[in-house]
Amino acid sequence: MGRVLADAEQSIWRRLRDSGVEADYIGANTTPAPFGARFVDFVVLFRLVDIPDLETARALFPEYTVFDDGTTFGQSIDYDLLLAFNAAWQEALAVFQERVARLDDPRITLFQTAFGDWTIDDPESSLSESALDKLNRADRLSVHVVADDDMRAGASNIVSLPAIEGDTGSSYQLHREDLLFGGAVEEAMISMNQGRPFVAFTFDESGKEAFCDATSESIGRRIALVLDGVVFSTPRVNSAVCGGSGIIGGELSVEQAENLAIYLDVGPMPASLGIQSCQAS
């Protein structure tokens, strides 16, 4: 982290120098620091002198979250400018923006306030608590071997996870290890087969390789496709699946399949964007 911070400081100084902005270096922090709902990898604090407005400062550092104290001295403004960089936060925000867009509701907008916070404007209070919760789900897909009786006996690496609502089983005993090893879904869509919905998906390259290995080693067994700790499907592996695609079917309702396809297609949330407050206007 120290090397990353040093490189960031040098980059900031070069950008300030090239733009002709006068600045004093104040300090840096390499430990994770919370700012509202954000957790940053590091922060760098500068005092920028005679910046005409905050947007000018933000334009210099588009990949940073910019905070300021707005202190005014006579006709000039000095900003205690806190530059907080977190790739996970930026990626999570992009996922969140896409999820809001997928709501396809013109009444609901997402915008950034002057203080750097992001706000969902829902003037008619059309978002329920469950809908807000869905916007911030992790939605990370994992694959596990369904444990048989021999695996369960005295095993500490077996975990019990609930089945999706509507499944005939209430829970499944699964091997704890995730066979995807961080591989992710690249694209997902809902399809129908004889009136029953299912979700077809394709993996990225790492997911394709991991799923091929997992199915090659699990022929004759059942594997569980798990999303956010809930078992969506437990297909039996008849042969290795190395084409980089798969389906989730079973007992899904149309609504469950539609939501699942959206979650997988948009991608997982790499960092929590916990809701700070909800208030009516």
Image: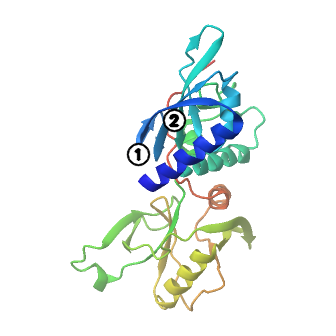
C-beta proximity under 8 Å, tags 1 and 2: no
Residue 68 seen in the figure: yes
State how the image is colored.
Answer: rainbow
Q: Residue at x 58, y 12 (%)?
A: 72
Image coordinates of residue 265 in percent, x first then y, are 67, 61
Q: Is residue 123 left or right of residue 165?
A: right
**In the drawing, what numbered circle is on residue 148?**
none
Image coordinates of residue 211 in percent, x first then y, are 55, 80
Q: Residue at x 63, y 61 (%)?
A: 264
Q: Residue at x 42, y 52 (%)?
A: 2
Residue type beneath disc 1: Thr
Residue 195 seen in the figure: no
Image coordinates of residue 256 in percent, x first then y, are 62, 57
Q: Spot the residue most to the left.
A: 154
Residue toward you, 120 or 6: 6
Quadrant in the picture for the C terminus: top right
Residue toward you, 224 or 88: 88
Q: Is residue 263 left or right of residue 34?
A: right
Say what secondary structure mark 1 lies in: loop
Q: Which residue is mark 2?
A: 275
Q: Is residue 221 left or right of residue 122?
A: left
Q: Residue at x 21, y 78 (%)?
A: 154
Q: In this rendering, is residue 14 above or below 251?
A: above
Say what secondary structure mark 2 lies in: loop
Residue type beneath disc 2: Ile
Q: What's the distance in space between the residues labelled 1 and 2, CA to CA?
A: 25 Å
Q: In this rendering, is residue 239 above or below 279?
A: below
Quadrant in the picture for the N terminus: bottom left
Q: In this rendering, is residue 209 above or below 13?
A: below
Dot 1 or dot 2: first in sequence order is 1
Q: Which residue is mark 1?
A: 30
